[in-house]
Image (spheres, rainbow, N blue to C red):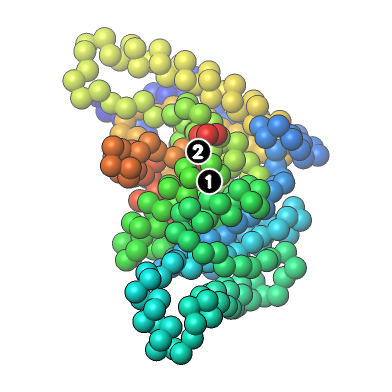
Amino acid sequence: MGTAAYSQSRRRGTAPRATPRVPTQSRAPAQTRVVDHTGSVRRNLLGTLLIANEDGSPLSGALRLAEALARRDGVNAHVFSVARPLSSSLSHLVSLVADLERHELEACRLQIGHARVRRQVHETVGLSTLFSTGVERGEPVSATAATARVRTAEFILVGLPKLGSRGRAGIEDAAFRVAKAAGVPVLAVPAHVDRLPRTALVHMDLGEASVRAARAALPLLADGGSLTLVHVVPNAEFAPPDAGGRVEVEARRVAKVLRQLGDELRLAGNLEVRSVVLQGDPARLLSDLAQDYDLTAVGAPKRGASGRFLMGSVSADVLRAAGGTVLIAPNRDG
């Protein structure tokens, strides 16, 4: 069966590469932003933006995006790096060479790490009272998760290297692991980003994490932005003769669910929400469509038996192919 797009008016057509032609819901009238303290739909930030300075990741885009969000909503943006623990033998050797006690060596490491973070912030966004800086000790994922809990972080931002660059795969896997460990949405931001996203694409598999991804995308969008909810019905490799009719029924059912979610999201105000149901290969379609959006939002994938994230998952494939910003939302329980 060829790739087909199912709109809410039940028309069929070929899935386009560009933004799908979907029935646009009427734009909600501009209104005062709704602050929902239960955490459902809102357009402003309440918690801290945590920017993790991972080795090998370009931080400039994450810093500029954090600066725009922090300035708009008056929240704190905290930038930090993690000093990994030295092995006992290496710590002893270095302290001897540097003629320092071990606690003095550790203090020097932390001071140097903190100075580097401050310099990077100043070079990218200048001196700003919106930013604070620091350095933590420990393993990057666990230290980041602990810092997010202490500072009540609403988002964790990490730099996303260019496609095909060294270290990209490690940053991708770390982003998923941090989202799961902290229970906080993670934004993987390329270096070229310099403003708030105006368009967002959300992969809706109708699981808890994807619904959270849609809600988490709201406070990231610029005023008057648009949000597109996309569900992809996978092609069946060996489809029975009546598969087409069942796909039609499933597409209508999913379209109804997406309309209901869209109605909820519009309560945030000053936002255009669209929804579309496609049929085909989810990873390929979403990766292709994502090229035309400023932000792509996905739910965090499940882990395999080895503890690593399933690289065959749609979320992982979308992040691997992304050239823009990707939002990764975990389940509520992390």
Taking 110 as reference, is 323 above or below it?
Answer: above
Badge 1: residue crowd in 10 Å (few <14, some 14–19, many ≥20): many
Viewer-proximal residue among 273 and 92: 92
Give how far across and how far down residue 320 sits, in percent.
Answer: 35, 51
**What is the three-letter code of the residue carrying label 1?**
Ala
Please state if 87 lies on the left or on the right of 194 as rendered: left
For residue 320, above or below residue 56: above
49 on left or right of 181? right
For disc 1, the marked residue is 182
Identify the mark at residue 88; answer none if there is no mark. Answer: none
Which amino acid type corresponds to the residue marked 2 in the rendered image?
Gly
Q: Could you tell me which secondary element the residue under label 1 belongs to?
A: helix
> In this view of the protein, which residue sits in the foreground, 111 or 319?
111
Q: Is residue 175 left or right of residue 156?
A: left
Is residue 88 depicted above or below 260 in this figure? below
Tell me what residue is drawn at x 59 percent, y 40 percent: 216
Q: Which residue is mark 2?
A: 334
Label 2 to label 1: alpha-carbon separation: 6 Å
Q: Earlier in the sequence, mark 2 or mark 1?
A: 1
Q: Residue furthest right?
A: 32
Q: Quadrant of residue 171?
A: bottom left
Question: Residue placed at 54% from the left, 74% from the top?
Answer: 110
